[in-house]
Amino acid sequence: MVAKGLKPSVARILLEFWLSFIKRYLHRGLIGYIYAVNYAYSRFLRQIKLYKHYKRKSKQGGYPR
């Protein structure tokens, strides 16, 4: 995501878990529930790590141009 130049937003961090969970859960029933929780959590962690990455870079003066 960093290589693509995507910047995180607070709205995406808050909605990513629920949107990905609902998308996966509706398609698979009970087994889908387990899969959906794992998938949504991993998407959420990815957004948090991206957010932390950009926060750390902004404190260090940003990316060189």
Image (tube, rainbow, N blue to C red):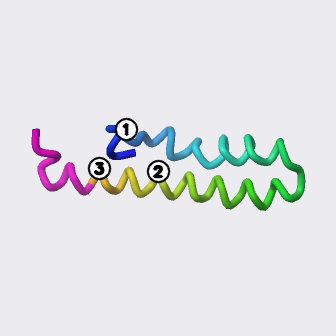
* Rendering coords of residue 20 (x, y %): 66, 44
Numbered circle sitting on residue 47:
2
Residue where numbered disc 3 is placed = 54
Q: CA distance from mark 2 to mark 3?
A: 11 Å
User: Residue 58: within the magenta?
Assistant: yes
* Rendering coords of residue 21 (x, y %): 70, 48
Mark 1 or mark 3: which comes first in sequence? 1
Q: Residue at x 42, y 40 (%)?
A: 9
Quarter of the figure that contains the N terminus: top left
Magenta span: predominant SS is loop
User: Residue 38: within the magenta?
Assistant: no
Span colored in magenta: 56-65
Residue type indicated by callout 1: Leu
Mark 2 or mark 3: which comes first in sequence? 2
Residue type indicated by callout 3: Tyr
* Rendering coords of residue 32 (x, y %): 82, 54
Residue where numbered disc 1 is placed = 6
Quarter of the figure that contains the C terminus: top left
Q: Nearer the viewer, mark 2 or mark 1?
A: 1
